[in-house]
Image (cartoon, coloured by chain):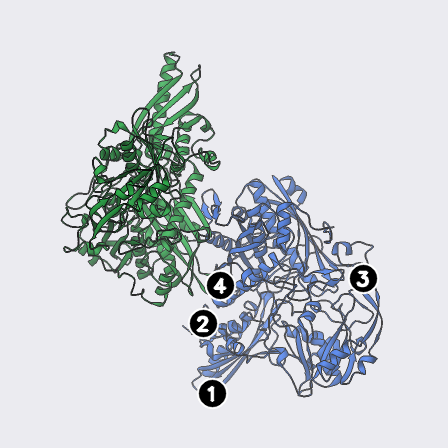
Chain colours: A green, B blue
Amino acid sequence: MTAGAVGESVRRVDIEAKVQGRRRYPQDFSLPGMLHAVVVWAGYPHARIRRIDPSEALAVPGVLAVLTHEDVPVNEYGINIYDQPVLASDKVRWLGDRVAVVVAETLRAAERARDLVRVDYEELPIVDDPLEAMRPEATLVHEDRRSNLLKHIYVRRGNVEEGFAAADVIVEGTYHTPFVEHAYLQPEAGLAYIDDEGRVTVICAAQWPHDDLRQIAHALALPLEQVREVVPAVGGAFGGREDISVQILVALAAWRLRRPVKMVWSREESIRGHGKRHPFHMRHRWGATKEGRLTAVEIEAVLDAGAYASTSVPVLENAVSFLAGPYAVPHARIDGYAVYTNNAVTMAMRGFGATQPPVGYELQMDRLAEALGMDPVEIRMRNLLEPGSIAVTGNRMPAVTSARETLRAAALAAGWREEPQGWRRPGASILRASHLRRGIGVACAYKNVGYSFGFDDRSTAIVELALASDGSIQSALVRCAAVEVGQGVTTVLAQLAAQTLGLEVSRVRVALTDTAATPSAGSSSASRHVFMSGNAVVKACRQALEKRDAALREESGATRIVAEATFRGHDVRRTTAYDIVDGHCEPHISYSFGTQIAIVEVDIETGAVQVDRLIAATNAGTPVNPRLCLGQVAGGVHMGVGYALMEEFIQQKGQVRTARLSEYHIPTVADMPRELESIFTEVPDPDGPYGATGLGETPTLPTAPAILNAIHDATGAWITELPATPERVWRALRGVPAQPAAPARRPCP
Amino acid sequence: MTAGAVGESVRRVDIEAKVQGRRRYPQDFSLPGMLHAVVVWAGYPHARIRRIDPSEALAVPGVLAVLTHEDVPVNEYGINIYDQPVLASDKVRWLGDRVAVVVAETLRAAERARDLVRVDYEELPIVDDPLEAMRPEATLVHEDRRSNLLKHIYVRRGNVEEGFAAADVIVEGTYHTPFVEHAYLQPEAGLAYIDDEGRVTVICAAQWPHDDLRQIAHALALPLEQVREVVPAVGGAFGGREDISVQILVALAAWRLRRPVKMVWSREESIRGHGKRHPFHMRHRWGATKEGRLTAVEIEAVLDAGAYASTSVPVLENAVSFLAGPYAVPHARIDGYAVYTNNAVTMAMRGFGATQPPVGYELQMDRLAEALGMDPVEIRMRNLLEPGSIAVTGNRMPAVTSARETLRAAALAAGWREEPQGWRRPGASILRASHLRRGIGVACAYKNVGYSFGFDDRSTAIVELALASDGSIQSALVRCAAVEVGQGVTTVLAQLAAQTLGLEVSRVRVALTDTAATPSAGSSSASRHVFMSGNAVVKACRQALEKRDAALREESGATRIVAEATFRGHDVRRTTAYDIVDGHCEPHISYSFGTQIAIVEVDIETGAVQVDRLIAATNAGTPVNPRLCLGQVAGGVHMGVGYALMEEFIQQKGQVRTARLSEYHIPTVADMPRELESIFTEVPDPDGPYGATGLGETPTLPTAPAILNAIHDATGAWITELPATPERVWRALRGVPAQPAAPARRPCP
């Protein structure tokens, strides 16, 4: 067996350099003659810009330039739609809008000058509630649009009236999820310079460098070949680096001033300046027979897109496909709306539209179970999507799925018993502390792997083999722009190459991502690299072996073999967009499934919730590196616990109330489950490399609803608005409504 | 359905009076003209008494008498053998020996005088180690015996040499369990007086009042009819009240002085003066095939009986029958020895010889599992005694057992999976605290219900029905001397009567135990009352119904029906003593089974062990009162946790080092498992009343070995000497031997 082959928990190939401080993050780079740039941020969440006066700022010694919209060749960018100005010209739409960039010889000079850039604003009424924003009379965030509605996507399946008529019970619920901050360790930073070949080169943390190139080139009106991005070590991403942050700003400054320019955001700038996870307002109405079979679902979801589109449309597309959960439903009416507001831009974040829906659909399942007196595992087992069954979007599920396997594994680990009359939950237990109530909650969830809705997802890898004179492989170099954001993709690609080439993993090197040297692999998102780039690497390795064999047959004496291969998602499953009439589509290339069971203890005196145990059953197909998979589960659960219990990015009238990590709380070690049990169901993905598939996002999805269901099990209270802070739980236990000062929540339109 | 019928968690019938302080415990009683008595305790653990001089004591004003051995008509007592003097005459053999009783008008006078009783001792060499005590040259504790060996009991089954030759692995282990204090809430107390019918009457806490009568009458040389015992509320017993404590002393004083006499022991007197659980020194050698089938066991156990026999012989008999665990073994050589020493008398304590063996046999099972790389549940499943299989003592097990059911239930609740290739343990989990190591441990255990080895176990109940003129039952009174020691037997007997009579439980009254009014029910021990007295009550009720029906047929107009019935254990299964040649016997009437799984966290920095979860699967047949059954489980686990982790009655050279509860630690709430999950497997006992059976002791048995196995699972260290204090665990983790000062442990003989 090859050392480091698939299935082995090989040590991360990048860990030694990181631990020893030798791997550099973007802010660690400097160049001779380097300038410093800082952003002049919008002063209001919604205001007209009457005038920008840089004169005082320019008078500060050392200041070389105050760049404004007038300096941007094509003043627009955006990952999905070009609706965002690089530097605001006529108006600002949120506090994260950038109005100008001050460039100086020193950081100190740049910061002094920033405060002297005079911007004359005319405040505009703000629209900070997506439900208000949808009204015809609402203030427009983008005046060139007819309304603030960015997108409406829907599914019509069967006949919901008929479905509800056939139901023995109907349960309804309204659910709200908050804005969430990515809170990566390393705030945004970048260094741009003109390289030896005359390319504007940006060193920065990114998830999708080749898409950054497109946007930089567009804004600077340069051909793609004249732009380059290099991605060194990245301190976390979680979707928050899929959008442009500093890239165009430093590129613009370096291009204009022909000197290296560096920009480093503070933590507060990072929190104020980059997008967030979408808040969802959801309304659910579900019907089921007394045997627990779903008959109909009616779901509306309103997403706050914030000031600019970012990926709100694809997030909405994803959300609509997942809103009814991994369940078979004959009749469905699902409507999703993405709405512009003057709130923070919302964007990709771990789960990408699949994270919020389980907070609705999994609570609905438990409401149905309660109404029917049915075990929560049993009711899920009766409705789960099977291989080949028809999803709510009308497509047929793949021939291999693992929803049932993950639910079964988690239930067994939690002490459920499968009995002739159905699944039966574990018995009640005695707690030694009388102010604590214990509860157990189940949640299933699923998500796409790879890009969806007709996007031509692909990844390209180049493999270079160094041969000995007898043709044996001495070492291999893998070139593939799959960014290592901390998830371990470099290690996994090295293992897949090692496995395919029959080489020790220590003999495989994976090149750093540099758009000038590594072919496009797509984004480090959508749990896709193991599947997409893994397949590309395996394919390239196989081609390289064939070339090597041919060279041996020809006795060419070649010492170096190069092979390039592209893996296309559409070769596995051709996805399609939502049908305009009924919303039917083939949404996703591939799927990932997970079930979690949370055992919580609720302090009924304070409302504090502690997760005692969390059992996470996840399907990673055949795990390439079980320890790295476990890392994804632990990290996903960490985010899920934060989502469930404490994380909430709060804006009031467009002002940020949680701009520091002392105000925006992410879970510490003490907030994590006292015990985390991770199970990999190991249902191989027939389309994945060696049966492997992605799992980067799935472990985040079931955590919050499992915790909410456990809180209900412990106390009888439904917490339907995240996060379940001690105050919210305390109020729910006592039936005390929220303080009047808090913004009132309205039902969906 | 009758309110309060079998299966309902009826509120304890005695709870209201207890909670309101209306039920009196022995020390709460007083009578006009009552005297106070105190004990003069032995001054040395082993000493000849040269002379007792009470003159100074008698001179204290108010002192009426200093009773010594000369005042005792027949100066011997003992529950099993009359080897104990009521008041020491020629020598004392332990610190708990009583030398004299001072009786005075006031407690103060009695206490003052106690210090003035001059006893002239000649110290003798003490023997405080049972292994030393077995040597031929050892000092004799009882000079009229040839050796200190009280009893040797053995089993020879098959051919162990052959069995070991057939083994693929052999594992050995030496295990030590400590002296354990009963630590009941209420220390010993009693009040004796001459009742209106001239009987010496003792009001005291007791487990077996009719056996107390026998011993009191014997010592006082009175016919049984002239002695009476009344048992009011009892503050715990746990076997510690099966032996005589104050009974003969107060009876003697009242009989001599013809006035009421009261004696109340302090906590320190209680700890010094009453017996303890037997320490066991065990040596095990077990063989198994690579499939995990046991081929042979060789076991030696040495029990420290202390200074007097008490129930050491029946405890030893029980222990030998259980030393190989609930497993089928073709070849066995088992030897048990009970040895006199000058240590505290050892006696009955919850489990009665079945509590110590699992500390050996369950660790042996895990050692075998480890040696074979086999799952600990799987190896047990492969060896468990089945219904009808042959036990190590050569008898056939009953047609219904529940060993497998309890193991299966506990394993499933803990997350084990039954797979085609066998049972598989739950996966490892991540703990948030890095100084903690988590482990999971399994232990099975079993125990007899009712008296064993040929003892003619029986219980008698009288039922009196009050009838209305139409013959319907107005109320019922149950008379049965089954002492309510806190376990809830009164409630359970009331429920069984209610069920049989078709009456609401509120209409059934159970009379307080009074030997003059309630027939003998045997002891509140051996988990026997539900089975024995329950059957007696049901039988008496059925006879009463027949009598009532006959009276109705005869139109006798009777308004009161009385029926008495005796239930004999031998009608279910006739037990026999150990065969003198091979030890074969029919040991027990009936069996109780339990499995526990402990999940512990070991602090590797301090050695402290916290039980995080404990899953207790117990068979109670059809539970008569599930909540009371749960109380037994919680209490049993509490004792088991103390046994495992902290309880140790320490004597050094015959002196007590733990005479206070500040030195002898029992678990507080904070030491209990954070979570206790109790499962009743509900395999009905075909011989029990309505399928019910006893479970008072079984929940204590598996706790300690489950915890020890979990500590091993967490850390790799075997703790083989109880309790697993932080120091012992810390030393085991670091391979640091105990301090030289601590008494060295030697192997078994």
Give whichever of discs 2 and 3 has the lower sequence position: 2
What's the distance in space between the residues labelled 1 and 4, CA to CA? 57 Å
Give whichever of discs 1 and 2 has the lower sequence position: 2
- Mark 1 sits on what residue? B557
Tell me the kind of residue under disc 2.
Ala
Callout 4 crowding tier (Cα within 10 Å): few <14, some 14–19, many ≥20: few
Q: Is residue A381 above or below residue B698?
A: above
- Disc 1 vs disc 2: which is toward the camera? 2
What's the distance in space between the residues labelled 1 and 2, CA to CA? 29 Å
Q: Is residue B50 above or below residue A616?
A: below
What SS does tag 1 mark? loop
From the image, which quarter does the N terminus of chain B lie in? bottom left
Tell me the kind of residue under disc 4.
Ala
What's the distance in space between the residues labelled 4 and 3, CA to CA? 54 Å
What's the distance in space between the residues labelled 4 and 2, CA to CA? 31 Å
Q: Nearer the viewer, residue B715 or A277?
A: A277
Is residue B82 shown left or right of residue B704?
right
In the rendered image, residue B178, in percent from the top left (x then y), is placed at 67, 58
- Mark 3 sits on what residue? B145
- Mark 2 sits on what residue? B5
**Chain letter behind tag 1:** B
What's the distance in space between the residues labelled 1 and 3, CA to CA? 65 Å
What SS does tag 2 mark? loop
Tell me the kind of residue under disc 1.
Gly
**Chain letter behind tag 2:** B
